[in-house]
């Protein structure tokens, strides 16, 4: 209604000027984000109307009742008014009515989102927030991965939501992918749930939204909404054990004889650490270091040499490998498709 | 320098002495003073100093965020900057500056000669002041004696378990805890003093129903302080126990609760917002009427709305926790409580508008800032309503939208009203007017800078930019907005320097003010500028809310109207 005014205007600028923006909450692509979007349009409508009316009155009053040097017979004070019960009552009652209306609309969305019925075939994913990366595991599928969450696309006529059961291994985090849903905090010693149902295939970006320590800024999230075929293929691939390529046996040795194994898991090997991301299918991921940089051999090399190069404050220590071992281990990791 | 007007100097206790006192004597006079005016000024001076320091920290952050993937400061430094900036602004700028004004003005406005407990007053100031020093000492001693210093870097609300020793080794978090704890002690002391003074030191005839609204609001604020600071202090002590005595209140690794800290903190933190904003309302209640040349519209409603805000604000804290997973029941409750608070807040805005209506509005610099306050407070209130809608908050919470919203309150409303108060009461305190010419420059520059910064800061929030990140990716479309935000910050800095310059320049060269430069109506304008140490030679007696109006208009005094219209019969009879 007041779409061109005030805050609506602001929201509109935001949406139109940057329609392509990957984390724009006004470009929803899933049910929870959608219902928030509709509710927010109602709220923006109401608040802009209030804004226009009240600031209009303010401007009118300032112009109309400004003190004029010449016109006035100076010294005289204006007529003193001390109050009026009727008027004050009216500007109490009208806001109360607005509040009731907004409250009811809000309650509806709270319950439809937080109390949605979970379909039997919904996908379950466990999300563990860690300083400064995300662990995603699919308990029913036997998959563990990091930072890049693959979920099936959800056809509105055939909803296939993904339920996230989340907790933290260390400090507070918050899982936020604006185009899919609002954020949910990821808190140690507390289990929260949320659900997403991306309705178009593609990549949805987000990031940690609760300050969690030095590298809070580089705790990014990538959600891949796959078509059913793509998703099935991805699952089948992730369920395979790690690739064993004899050409990189030397790098594999370096890995297995260093502390890497106490922090990282590579399924089917002696490496069973849980402190860092699972590397079984590292090379199948597009990025490393929680979405900070593309997963290229160069970046991998730089990261292993000294992780703080790419991500200062990261919890993986520099391993002080000599350049030969460094090259070898990098080569090994690039084969872990 | 101070050749022309020895009168200006009298306020440093040199009134009776013929020669200028030695600077050591002056210093001694200030350090040992129990005079509410001097303590008030020390509060204000202290807060202004920290305002500049924390403002500088903000500038550093804005430089870092102006472009994506910037390397101006390291993440460690950045995290320290936002923690110290927030903590300083709330505890060592906001609280002391408001208490400073309260200290200075309340006794003068109720016709008293000092606060009820002058020595407690001095104690409260010094303990709070010490807190601020402790916070910054962390930069030197934060890692213990042998390490280099480090600032606290846990965020101003210091969520557990980031504050535990595992995640925050060294002592920077301890400095933070102790600084906040001490400031809390000082705050309680001053609040107690304000309540006692208001209840028991009013001059003859000043019934509660004739109390200037400023004093009413300080009373409400102080009472809220009692409720709010307790949980904060308790939480800080529990945190200390966790860190050094092996308890596990917030130690999630040993079964403690992170959410418990959030509750404790926000049971303090939300009322705190109102504790800071009510004094701004207080100034508006005095300044808007004087420059509209009209009595405040609906005094009883204003009092009721303030008390209402005070009570409701104690029950809204979990709107900071909509994303924590409290469940739909709790979320719904806190949505309602939060929305309800907009009703008394709305009453205030409408009553201010009604006060302007039919007046003769004088656009002094003080009034310009007050109008800025009105406008910006309206906007901040509306974005507040958006945030109270829990599902919308699931998106907006902890994003730059929230940062923009609360800076709209803290800067757009509170700081604007503080500037207004400075222009209004500076003449009373120093005997000199602040330059209106420089003031207009200050105002317009600040308005432009403010809106560039904080209007545009909403947008990256809507586009998914979380707060407290030291840098961001180039592909998110946030850069252009961050550039604008940062440029506005620079303009605000220039405006603030202009203000500081104005304060200094006018102290020496400003026009002499006289007792009552604004033709105002409350008691502080009936004594000299600056007021003598004893405030009033003769204790005043009042018969209405605007004693000086009655004096100036004996043919048509307020007392004729006030009683009939709004007060219950019993108090009417008393007053006759
Ligand atoms: Cu995080």
Image (cartoon, coloured by chain):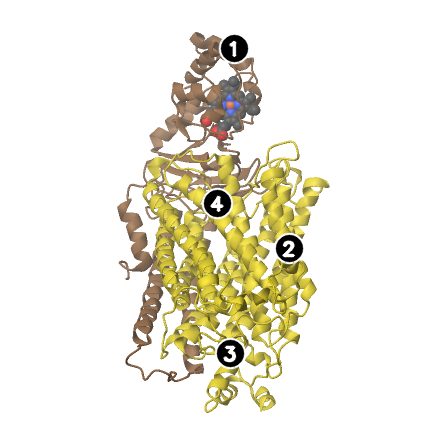
The numbered mark at residue A253 is: 1
- Residue B16 quadrant: bottom right
**Coordinates of residue B400 in the picture (x, y in percent):** 42, 48
Numbered circle sitting on residue B24: 2
Q: In terms of image quadrants, where is residue A295? A: top left
Tint of chain B: yellow
Above or below residue B56? Residue B527 is below
Q: Which one is closest to the eye, mark 4 or mark 2?
A: 2
Q: Residue A189: which numbered mark, if any?
A: none
Pointer 4 chain:
B
Q: Residue B300's mark?
A: 3
Could you confirm whether marks 2 and 1 are on the same chain? no
Is residue A43 placed above or below A73 in the rendered structure?
above
Dot placed on the residue nearer the N-terminal end, 4 or 3: 4
Give the chain of mark 3: B
The label nearer to you, 1 versus 3, is 3
SS label for mark 4: helix
Whole-number angstrom distance, CA of label 4 to CA of label 1: 49 Å
Relative to residue A271, is residue A248 drawn left or right? left
Mark 2 in CB contact with mark 1 (< 8 angstroms): no
Along the viewing direction, whichever of A99 and B107 lies nearer the viewer: B107
The answer, for residue A25, to whether it is visible in the render is no
Given contact means CB atoms under 8 Å apart, are the residues at marks 1 and 3 in contact? no
Task: Look at mark 4 in the image and give the residue it sits on.
Answer: B57
Q: Nearer the viewer, residue A112 or B427?
A: B427
Please state the horizontal and vertical placement of residue B63, each as a whole percent of the image.
40, 41
Quick check: is the Cβ at mark 2 less than 8 Å away from ligand 1? no
Chain letter for brown, please.
Answer: A
Q: Are marks 3 and 2 on the same chain?
A: yes
């Amino acid at each position: 209604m007041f779409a061109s005014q005030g805050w609506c205007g602001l929201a509109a600028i935001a949406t139109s000027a940057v329609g392509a923006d990957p984390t724009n909450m006004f470009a929803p692509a899933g049910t929870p984000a959608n219902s928030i979007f509709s509710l927010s349009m109602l709220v923006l409508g109401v608040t802009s109307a209030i804004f226009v009316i009240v600031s209009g009155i303010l401007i009118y009053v300032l112009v109309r009742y400004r003190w004029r040097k010449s016109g006035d017979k100076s010294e005289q004070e204006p007529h003193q008014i001390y109050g009026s019960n009727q008027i004050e009552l009216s500007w109490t009652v009208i806001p109360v009515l607005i509040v009731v209306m907004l409250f009811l609309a809000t309650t509806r969305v709270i319950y439809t989102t937080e109390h949605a019925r979970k379909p039997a075939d919904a996908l379950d994913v466990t999300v563990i927030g860690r300083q400064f990366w995300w662990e995603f595991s699919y308990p029913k599928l036997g998959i563990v991965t990091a930072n890049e969450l693959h979920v099936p696309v959800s056809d509105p006529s055939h909803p296939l939501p993904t339920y996230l059961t989340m907790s933290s291994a260390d400090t507070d985090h918050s899982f936020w992918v604006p185009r899919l849903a609002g954020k949910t905090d990821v808190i140690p010693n507390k289990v929260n749930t949320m659900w997403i149902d991306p309705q178009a295939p593609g990549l949805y970006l987000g990031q940690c939204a609760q300050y969690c320590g030095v590298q809070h800024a580089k705790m990014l999230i990538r959600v891949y909404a796959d078509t059913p075929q793509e998703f099935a293929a991805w699952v089948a691939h992730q369920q395979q054990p790690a690739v064993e390529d004899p050409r990189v046996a030397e790098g594999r040795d370096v890995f297995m004889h260093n502390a890497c194994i106490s922090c990282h898991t590579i399924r089917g090997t002696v490496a069973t650490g849980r402190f860092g991301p699972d590397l079984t299918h590292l090379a199948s991921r597009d990025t490393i270091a929680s979405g900070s940089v593309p997963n290229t051999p160069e970046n991998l090399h730089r990261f292993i040499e000294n992780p703080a190069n790419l991500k200062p404050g990261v919890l993986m220590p520099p391993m002080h490998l000599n350049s030969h071992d460094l090259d070898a281990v990098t080569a090994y990791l690039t084969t872990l498709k | 320098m101070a050749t022309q007007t020895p009168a200006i100097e009298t306020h440093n206790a040199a009134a009776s002495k013929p020669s200028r006192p030695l600077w050591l004597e002056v210093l001694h006079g200030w350090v040992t003073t129990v005079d509410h005016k001097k303590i008030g000024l020390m509060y204000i001076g202290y807060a202004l100093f920290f305002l500049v320091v924390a403002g500088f920290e903000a500038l550093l952050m804005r430089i870092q965020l102006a472009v994506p993937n910037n390397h101006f400061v390291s993440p460690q430094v950045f995290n320290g900057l936002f923690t110290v900036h927030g903590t300083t602004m709330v505890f060592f700028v906001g609280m002391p500056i408001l208490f400073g004004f309260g200290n200075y003005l309340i006794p003068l406005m109720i016709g008293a000669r000092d606060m009820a407990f002058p020595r407690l007053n001095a104690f409260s100031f010094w303990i709070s002041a010490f807190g601020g020093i402790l916070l910054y000492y962390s930069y030197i001693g934060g890692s213990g004696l042998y390490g280099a210093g480090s600032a606290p870097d846990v965020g101003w609300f210091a969520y557990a378990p980031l504050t535990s020793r595992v995640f925050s080794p060294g002592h920077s978090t301890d400095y933070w805890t102790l600084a906040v704890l001490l400031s809390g002690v000082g705050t309680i002391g001053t609040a107690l003093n304000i309540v006692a003074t208001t209840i028991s030191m009013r001059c003859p005839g000043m019934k509660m129903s004739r109390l200037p609204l400023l004093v009413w609001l300080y009373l409400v604020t102080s009472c809220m302080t009692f409720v709010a600071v307790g949980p904060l202090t308790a939480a800080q002590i529990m945190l200390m126990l966790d860190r050094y005595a092996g308890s596990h209140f917030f130690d999630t690794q040993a079964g403690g609760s992170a959410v418990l800290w959030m509750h404790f903190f926000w049971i303090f933190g939300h009322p705190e917002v109102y504790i800071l904003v009510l004094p701004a309302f207080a100034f508006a209640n005095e300044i808007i009427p004087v420059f509209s040349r009209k009595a405040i519209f609906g005094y009883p409603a204003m009092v009721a709305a303030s008390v209402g805000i005070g009570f409701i604000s104690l029950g809204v804290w979990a709107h900071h926790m909509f994303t924590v997973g409290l469940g739909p029941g709790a979320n719904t409750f806190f949505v309602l409580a939060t929305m309800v608070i907009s009703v008394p807040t709305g009453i205030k805005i409408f009553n201010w508008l009604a006060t302007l209506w039919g007046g003769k509005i004088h656009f002094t610099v003080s009034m310009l800032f007050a109008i800025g306050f009105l406008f910006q407070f309206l906007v901040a209130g509306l974005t507040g309503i958006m945030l109270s809608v829990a599902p919308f908050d699931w998106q907006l919470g902890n994003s730059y939208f929230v940062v923009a919203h609360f800076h709209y309150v803290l800067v757009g409303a509170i700081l604007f009203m503080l500037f207004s108060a400075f222009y209004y009461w500076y003449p009373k305190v120093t005997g000199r007017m602040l330059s209106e010419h420089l003031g207009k420059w200050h105002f317009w520059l600040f308005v432009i800078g403010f809106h560039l910064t904080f209007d545009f800061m909403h947008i990256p929030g809507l586009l998914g930019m979380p707060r407290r990140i030291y840098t961001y990716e180039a592909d998110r479309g946030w850069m252009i907005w961050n550039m604008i935000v940062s440029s506005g910050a620079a303009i605000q800095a220039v405006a603030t320097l202009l203000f500081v310059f104005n304060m200094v320049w006018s102290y020496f060269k400003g026009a002499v003010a006289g007792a009552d430069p604004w033709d105002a109506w409350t008691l502080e304008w009936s004594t000299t500028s600056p007021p003598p140490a004893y405030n009033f030679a003769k204790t005043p007696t009042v018969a209405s809310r605007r004693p000086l109006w009655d004096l100036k208009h004996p043919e048509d005094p307020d007392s004729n109207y006030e009683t009939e219209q709004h007060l219950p019969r019993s108090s009417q009879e008393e007053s006759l």
